[in-house]
Amino acid sequence: MSVWLENAIARGQGADDWLAPKRTQALELLAKTAWPTRKTEAWRYTPLRSVERSPAKASTVAANLLPTSVADLSAIELVFVNGRFDTTQLTDDLPEGLSITLGKNLSSGQQGEALANISTIKPERHLFGLINDVLSQDVLLVSVAEGVHITQPIRISSLSSQGVESHTRVFVNLAPNSRLTVIEDTHAQGDSLTTAFVEYQIASNAYLEHYRFALQTGNNVSIGGSHFNLLDHAKMHSTLVGFGSDLTRIDTDIIHAGKFADAKLNAMYLLDGKELFDLHATVEHAMPNGTTEENVRGIVADRSRSVFNGRIHIHPDAQKTLAELNNRNLLLSDRAEINTKPELEIYADDVKCAHGATVAQIDKQALYYLQTRGVSRARAQVMLNFGFINELIDLMPNAALAEWVRPMIRERFLQMEVN
Amino acid sequence: MTEQIDKALAREYEAGFVSDVESETFEPGLNEDVIRRISVMKGEPEWMLEWRLSAFREWLEMEEPEWALVDYPKVDFQAISYYSAPKSMKDKPKSLDEVDPELLRTYEKLGIPLIEQQMLAGIAVDAVFDSVSVVTTFREKLEEAGVIFCPISEAVHKYPDLVKKYLGSVVPKKDNYYAALNCAVFTDGSFVYIPKGTRCPMELSTYFRINEQNTGQFERTLIVADEGSHVSYLEGCTAPQRDENQLHAAVVELVAMDNAEIKYSTVQNWYPGDENGKGGIYNFVTKRGICHTSAKISWTQVETGSSVTWKYPSCVLKGDNSVGEFYSVALTRGRQQADTGTKMIHLGKNTKSTIITKGISAGRSNNSYRGLVRMNPGAQGARNFTQCDSLLIGDQCGAHTFPYVESRNPSAIIEHEATTSKVSDEQMYLCRQRGLDPEKAVSMIVNGFCKEVFKELPMEFAVEAGKLLEISLEGSVG
Amino acid sequence: MSNTQSLLTIEELYASVEEKQIIKGLNLDVKPGEVHAIMGPNGAGKSTLGYVLSGRDGYSVESGSAVLDGQDLLEMETEDRARAGLFLAFQYPVEIPGVSNLEFLKASVDAQREARGEEAITSAEFLKEAKAACKQVNLPVSFLKRGVNEGFSGGEKKRNELMQMLLLKPKLCILDETDSGLDIDALQVVAEGVNSQRSADRSFIVVTHYQRLLDYIKPDFVHVLSDGKIVKSGDASLALELEAQGYAWLQKEPAEDELEG
């Protein structure tokens, strides 16, 4: 047991609000959880020293933080500042069929209903998910009514001040036949520690377009998860873009709880300096006829380290599943490190599943081709690195976000330490 | 269909008979005294006993690994007998004529006649029965070439310098739980030394047989191929059909010096237990080789037996330009569980490794590939290619892939691919339309699926392996 | 012939790939405005010449020299050779997914202009030029937005190479089997593009296996490359001769020389 965890457990005890039953449950689980070591499979390559050493403290001091502006996005902004939902930044002009409420403002009947759903999609095995259960102030509930298509994207921003520890928690419910776009974004100043977990219930025939950006760098710890439960014929398209920090860890869980569900996940990470980035993506096919397509790409430079675990689990009832995972990595420096582990666990025979993983350098032929056109080697490398990631950026359905993130990625490549 | 498959899979295990041989067997139990007694039985020098005891003390501090995807009741190490030898072996028969005819009959029944004239030409055999080596054939012929092929218990006496130098040099005593246990209690196994520049004139083979009840088999194999030498080695294994689980915890160490080549093939057919998962061998094995400059180690395994398999034949590619290969077919059925794969540790420049595995799952079995490819910072220009394919027969089984890929050298290239599929209706239809019965069709398709691996086996054994699969799959289609 | 007048002078060039000698004492002199065809059987080293001149990794020069416009090519980085005016149109252009054609072209043009001390071209101006170049080689403008050569057909790739040539305005163009895999219509488009670029200050080395391309791009000189060196040179009529007789008669020649010697 670590001092940090003991401290978190102690802080989580005694709160007597509507979330108390959830908290008690999480505390019980935490009491039984050992602090991860190198031998803990889920943290094999990711030491938690930076969590234990983090100077971040919970804060109640009001801070005035605003989400980053993205041209042409015009999203509905849900802003958490140091773990507290900032109601002043929420528009009072929500589209018909969309509701956004803090759990504490619900009637006790509604709270009971919410309690039955929260933490049922996020798997119990996520240590920091349990910590978030215990330490998040409240849960923000977002819900789209049946058949409603919300065209305006929702952006959930978790913003933290210097030295602050904060915990964000959201539950998103898409009723049957509805559509919604959600963007998760985290921005934290130095010495901070943020956990941000969002659960998505995607009912039959509903469609979720999802983005998660973890673009903060530097000396902070950012841990979180996006967890999706897909019912019959539900669809999701998710894009994840990550830079590293002292520690950035994201757990994605996609659960095919209904038949004929369809999930796409495109994830990319670009690491520099001494950054560490860890993505664990798990897909559970519990029901038949589901499809999953995952493309994960990483570029790792200087002294940074990447960890990827891509697990596809086909349960006995998930016949006729099609699931594919492709993970490609470029290792740019002899001091950097790539650890990748695609996994298949299959208990149904009539399925088509495959995964592939490569670790290599930039394609030498392409490099030569660019040089024969007069482009310098260094510039050609940047172009090729960018192209490698840009292929996935091009697949982002939201053009405004693609235009926003593209120059940041280009800039990062220009600054990367390559040898 | 599942019911039919299960029914059909309840086939005879052909090697399941018990030989009526009078044995001297230790009482079950494990402590330092037992280890001293083993050492006395083997007439070992003091250093060997000390080595065993230090391993035992390490083992007591260690924990049984639990990361593999296998589920079995824990082994009671005090309920196992750690030494069993036919009484007739007490006086060390000098020649084949002095060997108990019942022992010879046992091997004959298993298709391994030990009379040299009757043997497949060009294969020397070391026959290990429970805890002792019964006979090693063609020794004179091998000695002419300078090749040492003898029981490891004999090598401890005759070649102490070689044994001291290399035993535990590839798999350290405290490498893992089962390896440490093996170091403490190993009884016999084979020792091979190929001198510099020598191409071993024949295939070497060890045949392991567990016969006695409640015993474990802890064999130890050490193969040293000196500079520029070449050897091809094959091991086979069977055990009687019993209701109790028996433990087999072996350690195999290979040393390939500069430019040497070792080809190590295994056809593993330990008793797999009955259709309900009763009985069978726990096969917890550590196999590892070290390759020096430009050396090559090639592991080929066909795993059809054992109720639980935990086995990762590995290569440490230490020398520049060295090569490691792993070819595997693992077939599980009934309630068998296999967690097997390899580790390729690239240390030297321009090292290359290839991993090709074929997992076939039937019945209610679970079959996992678990592998590690690691490129260390010094592995300039290293390459790995991995292809793991799984085939599922029936909807009650599992096929899993857990590859660990770690790179710390930007010039190294790693490619890993895995697929999973089933025997398709179209393939079956085509075969049957051409007049094949479903069983033949499945075995043909499965054989085709495994072809890439079978072609790596020495020819005689490729045929054996094909037949073994055929028997194993008998009636797997309802 | 003096070097001051020549655009490219190759003297006694020996080069190897993976320790196998491919170019074995090659001499060639190209003056501004000339079109030289290099023909020869498979394996003669035709493509290797382009790779060696452009400085591809793995192609090492053992001895000899290659001077472009007074600059020692062999001492330069690949990109500097390009900036000095060397352009290689590839037989099999590589696909670079994710890098758009436009981005790639702009980067190339920018780099070359900068090297020549010219002012950078604005994006709008460049787009205009690129569109015009597309039109000239008969490629839809939408190809500018696609990944470099990504999913292009064989003909489209060749036209894309040609478009790059139009935009980069090199002094020396090496066309490496540009005719391979092209049907007659595509061949004409490519040839017209090349011909439109012929001028007094631009030279071409047209590497080809077949005479067919030379019906459309009339060479001033034809050379036969065999076993790493030029074994015969002549005017355009040599190509016709080769078409009629094949290469076998030329390949025998060195052997006969040896007999006489």
Image (cartoon, coloured by chain):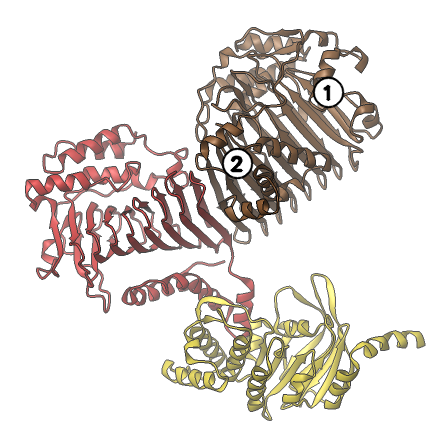
Q: Amino acid at mark 2?
A: Val
- The correct choice, above or below, for B269 with respect to B354 in the image is above
Rendered residue at 41%/38% (across/down): A44
The residue drawn where x is 64% and y is 6% is: B24
Q: Is residue B95 visible?
A: no
Quickly name the residue at label 1. B108
Q: What is chain C's hue in the picture?
A: yellow
Residue C34 x, y percent position in the rendering: 65, 90
First in sequence: mark 1 vs mark 2: 1
Q: Which residue is mark 2?
A: B477
Residue B194 relative to residue B167: left or right: right
Q: Colour of chain B?
A: brown
Residue B170: image location, x then y, percent: 61, 31
Q: Residues within 10 Å of mark 1 (few under 14, many from 20)?
A: some
Q: Give the residue type that dot 1 points to.
A: Glu
- Label count reads 2
| Chain letter belonging to callout 1 | B
- Furthest-bottom residue in view? C200
Image-quadrant location for residue B135: top right
Whether labels 1 and 2 share one chain: yes
Residue located farthest toward the right when viewing the structure as drawn? C260
Q: Is residue C99 left or right of residue C54?
A: left
Q: Where does residue B314 sit, x and y in percent of width and height?
A: 58, 36
Secondary element under disc 1, as helix, strand or loop, is: helix
Please, which chain is the residue tagged with disc 2 on?
B
State the residue in front, A185 or A60. Answer: A185
Res. B413 in view: yes
Colour red belongs to chain: A
How many C-alpha atoms fall within 10 Å of the one at disc 2: few (<14), some, or many (≥20)? many
Q: Is residue B24 above or below residue B475?
A: above
| Viewer-side label of 1, 2 | 2
Whole-number angstrom distance, CA of label 1 to CA of label 2 = 32 Å
